[in-house]
Image (tube, helix red, strand yellow):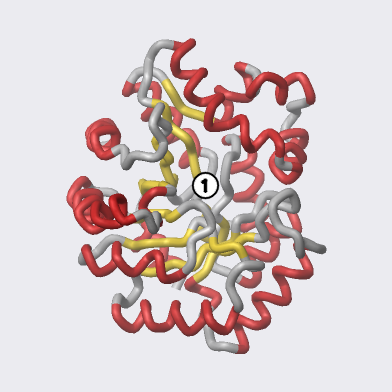
Amino acid sequence: MTDDLKAAVGRYGIWNRQLRSEEPELREQIPEAAAELQELGFTTVWLGSGPGVEHAKPLLEATTRLAVATGILTIWQYPAAEVAERAAALEHAHPGRFLLGLGVGHPQFIEEYRSPYAAMVGYLDALDAAGQPAGRRVLAALGPRMLGLARDRAAGAHPYLVTTGHTARAREALGPDALLAPELGVVLESAPARARTMARAALAPYLKLSNYLANFRTFGFGDDDFADGGSDGLVDAVYAWGSDERIRERIDAYLAAGADHVAVQVITATPSVLPREEWRRLAALLD
């Protein structure tokens, strides 16, 4: 199953928040945008900002081979039995093309947040009881315990905002067979000051979240790196920017570190707009 999943997910995908938007103007654009992403050669779309299973449906209906994943569905927001039922309906309608990405979210945003590992184990137990296949889900795992759970109770992991060092360590924790599909932010800008400014605007909200800070500390970053939107070293470690050649090298560095797939999030100055021109440029440099 994992080999089939890896083939379906492919090497390069797109991570985006607006492709799960419920705003009428953006919703009208989603089917056409999904169809274009498929034609550009991207194999998977990861829906950001806590999507539900239902948000994958318009993209699956608009395409014929594109895989669509939740990146990630927060377990506190959606009952497991409901998730299993909706995932089964998508699997029936679009066999092998929906992937359920799950995560525990962040205590800063979730009032009922408690023991994340135990909560995820309980949620996976409920999914199992409802018949949702472990081979059709991945976990937003950062630390070793959650990575172990991704290996043992899911098809693999979809870590967000990580370095190549984390990717290498995640591969060791997952073993050779599990799917490893990290997200990577990409700024299609060569000027260092402008590229880092755009990256910092994207990074700053995450520097208030304890889960990410703890993970960064594991890889040698400290308080000085978290000030003023992030140090140059931190920005350059978790975002790719520069010439097309340099961006391609940075993306492929995650594959070299052990990733099977890279979910690319294009960072722009207008994040509320679908970056379709930037996706075209990205497709060309990844050709």
In this view, which residue lies farthest toward the front? 24
Q: Residue at x 78, y 69 (%)?
A: 118
Residue 230 horizontal side relative to residue 199, left or right? right
Describe residue 2's horizontal placement relative to residue 283 as left or right.
right
Q: Could you tell me which secondary element the residue under label 1 belongs to?
A: loop
Give the residue at the far right of this rendering: 115
Q: What residue is drawn where x is 55% and y is 22%? A: 236
Q: Quadrant of the C terminus?
A: top left
- In the image, residue 114 lies at what x, y percent? 80, 63
Q: Position of residue 119 (x, y in %)?
A: 74, 69
Q: Nearer the viewer, residue 244 or 227?
A: 227
Position of residue 206 relative to residue 250, above or below, is below
Where residue 21 sits, quadrant-wise, is bottom left
Residue 128 image-quadrant placement: bottom right
Q: Quadrant of the N terminus?
A: bottom left
Instruction: Give the image location of residue 214, x and y in percent.
Output: 77, 40
Q: How many marks?
A: 1
* Pointer 1 local density, CA inside 10 Å: few below 14, some 14–19, many at least 20: many
Image-based side of 124 in relation to 45, left or right: right
State the residue at coordinates (41%, 41%).
Answer: 264
Q: Nearer the viewer, residue 159 or 1?
A: 159
* Residue receiving disc 1: 182
Position of residue 148 relative to residue 201, above or below, is: below
The amino acid pointed to by label 1 is: Pro
What is the x, y in percent for residue 101? 52, 63
Q: Residue at x 53, y 81 (%)?
A: 82
